[in-house]
Image (cartoon, helix red, strand yellow):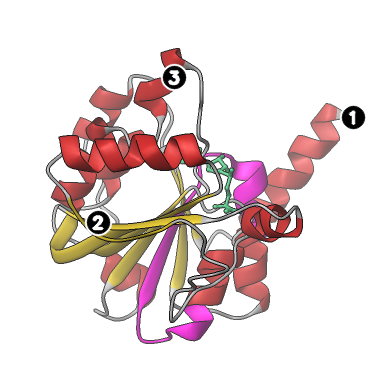
Amino acid sequence: MRMRKKGNLESRLVSCSDLITVADTTEKNMRRAAAIKEYLDMRAAFGNAHKVYLEIGCGKGAFAVGMAKLFPERNFLAVEKISNVLIAAAEKAKEENLKNLHFLNCAAEVLPKYVKDGEIAGIYLNFSNPLPKEGYKKQRLTHPRFLNMYRALLSPDGVVEQKTDDKDFYLFSLESYKEASYTVLDRREDLAADPLDVDVETEHEARFKAAGKKIFYIKAKP
Ligand SMILES: C[S@@+](CC[C@H](N)C(=O)[O-])C[C@H]1O[C@@H](n2cnc3c(N)ncnc32)[C@H](O)[C@@H]1O
């Protein structure tokens, strides 16, 4: 049974292979892996030189697909470490025939292997795992070690935008931005009451909203 599932995943990945770059997993040490550069050729991936926006932890892709449809003049690179999840996002993009959305199947930790410094116009962190246990603090995608990596990847005008339903993670992130010398440009504690001018709902967001949870938002600039 497991073999069949895996085989099925592989054939689905093959049918979307023009949309997905799969990380080389031979080097298990993330730091060493990131040091061996295999930069994505953004021009070849998107067929133009438009600005590239990154979503880290795209899940099943509702946000990335929605944004790519809303902003055809922007390119979106959606990163997800779990291929089983990423395939659902890539299939959506294929169905919509989106040319401005590409997927990178890797962990955020190895992004500098694929993305050059200054190449990214903006980063979206949507409902990143809050990882509440103290021992997992360094894995949180808004830990200063990640914020310092994003600083290098972002162009001079680039910003990070984050949505979460988790108040503790929101407060932790505010502290992290401060610690990593980011400027918080905007923060909202209930997007339903105080919505953004332009926004796309993610899969997790739809679920949290249906459960009556508040959605927190931060926009910060290195
Ligand atoms: C809670 S889900 C949110 C998915 C989607 N953004 C949404 O709002 O519906 C978090 C996603 O981030 C991915 N993820 C977590 N840590 C990651 C990392 N270090 N690198 C890449 N993806 C990661 C998980 O696999 C998962 O699909």
Q: Give the answer, above or below, for where 11 lies relative to 173.
A: below
> In this picture, which residue range is highlighted in magenta?
68-88
**Residue 27 visible to an observer of this rendering:** no
Instruction: Rate crowding at label 1 as few (under 14), some (14 to 19) or many (20 or more) other CA atoms within 10 Å.
Output: few
Disc 2 residue type (three-letter) = Ala
Side of 82 relative to 139 (left or right): right
Q: CA distance from mark 3 to mark 1?
A: 33 Å
**Residue 57 falls left or right of residue 116:** right
Gap between marks 2 and 3, in whole Å?
23 Å
The residue nearer to you, when weighing 2 against 74, is 74
- Disc 1 residue type (three-letter): Met
Q: Quadrant of the N terminus?
A: top right
Q: Which residue is mark 2?
A: 220
Residue at 50 percent of width and 46 percent of height: 80
| Point 61% across, 65% down: residue | 62
Cα distance in 3D space between marks 1 and 2: 46 Å
Inspect the magenta stretch and tell me whether residue 114 lies in it: no
- In the picture, measured across the screen, residue 1 lies left or right of residue 73, that is right
Assign a secondary structure to mark 1: loop
Residue highlighted by disc 1 = 1
